[in-house]
Amino acid sequence: MPLSWRAADGSRAIPGAAEVMIECLPLSTLPAELRGAGYDLREDGEGQRILAAAIVQEFTLSSSGAFELMTEGSK
């Protein structure tokens, strides 16, 4: 049985297979580019991935009492 491979863009396939599975972020342009190139794409629903590193966003409490994303000069 041939081994599956994974490309840098997250696609996976078995050599010689008629279908390839790709996973992209919600705002990725890859699906539109592939459709534009003539590929038949079908959505397979949404999923979740565990990130290798945490994404940290710092918020501050504004004078109105609302939380705002901190910017570079707001510390």
Image (cartoon, rainbow, N blue to C red):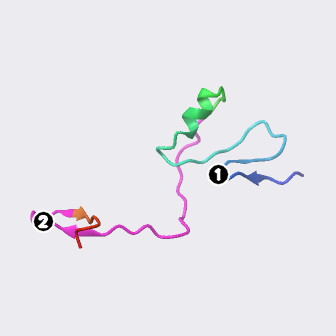
Contact, mark 1 vs mark 2 (Cβ under 8 Å): no
Place residue 36 in its image quadrant.
top right
Callout 1: helix, strand or loop? loop
Image position of 34 (left or right of 4): left
In the image, residue 19 lies at what x, y percent? 74, 38
User: Which residue is depicted at the point 81% across and 40% down?
Assistant: 17
Q: Nearer the viewer, residue 33 or 23?
A: 33
Q: Residue furthest front?
A: 73
Marks 1 and 2 sit apart, C-alpha to C-alpha, by 41 Å
What is the magenta segment's predominant secondary structure? Answer: loop
Q: Is residue 12 above or below residue 57?
A: above
* The label number, if any, that marks residue 10 in the structure image: 1
Q: Residue furthest left?
A: 64
Amino acid under label 2?
A: Gly
Image position of 4 (left or right of 23): right
Callout 2: helix, strand or loop? loop
Q: Check the picture and name the quadrant holding the C terminus.
A: bottom left
Amino acid under label 1?
A: Gly
Place residue 43 in its image quadrant.
top right
User: Which residue is depicted at the point 54% across and 44% down?
Assistant: 45
Place residue 34 in its image quadrant.
top right
User: Which residue is depicted at the point 35% across and 67% down?
Assistant: 57
List the residue tagged with mark 2.
65
Q: Nearer the viewer, residue 3 or 56?
A: 56
Verify whether residue 48 appears in magenta: yes
* The label number, if any, that marks residue 72 in the structure image: none
In the image, residue 1 lies at what x, y percent? 90, 52
Highlighted magenta segment, given as a residue range: 42-67
